[in-house]
Image (cartoon, rainbow, N blue to C red):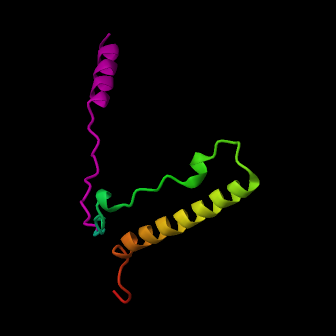
Amino acid sequence: MKFLMLLCVLFLVACTSVEKVPVSVPVETKVPVIIPCIEHSEIPVPPNFATNLVQGHETDCELVNIVLTERAQQKKYIEELKAVLAGCVKPAGS
């Protein structure tokens, strides 16, 4: 009986041991913060491209004209986007 009690006490003592938790040391990391260079309102609105208006009854000549019109719209829109993004480009040598 004494042996059984001693064994129980030993098991209970083993359960009460405390593990040491490693202490983490904070490390300072310098990371650049991203700052938006343009406002959402400055982004040009895409045009209503000409091919969106195709209804299916156009002749081949009309379709060619629509595609050429859209190409001109795309060129203009791309130039507007480039102009807005030009302000976001980091100057050379910095």
* Number of marks: 0
Q: Position of residue 65 (x, y in %)?
A: 66, 60
Q: Which residues are magenta?
A: 1-29
Of residues 60 and 24, the one drawn nearer to the viewer in this rendering: 60
Which residue sits at x=30%, y=14%? 2
Q: Is 49 left or right of 31, judged from the image as shown?
A: right
Of residues 46 and 70, the one drawn nearer to the viewer in this rendering: 70
Of residues 9 and 85, the one drawn nearer to the viewer in this rendering: 85
Residue 25 belongs to magenta span: yes
**Quadrant location of residue 93?**
bottom left
Looking at the image, is 17 positioned above or below residue 35? above
Q: Position of residue 54 (x, y in %)?
A: 63, 46
Q: Position of residue 24 (x, y in %)?
A: 26, 55
Which residue sits at x=31%, y=30%? 14
Q: Is 63 left or right of 10, judged from the image as shown?
A: right
Residue 14 belongs to magenta span: yes
Q: Residue furthest bottom?
A: 93
What is the quadrant of the N terminus in the image?
top left
What is the quadrant of the C terminus in the image?
bottom left
Which residue sits at x=64%, y=42%? 55
Looking at the image, is 22 positioned above or below residue 2? below
**Quadrant location of residue 74?**
bottom right
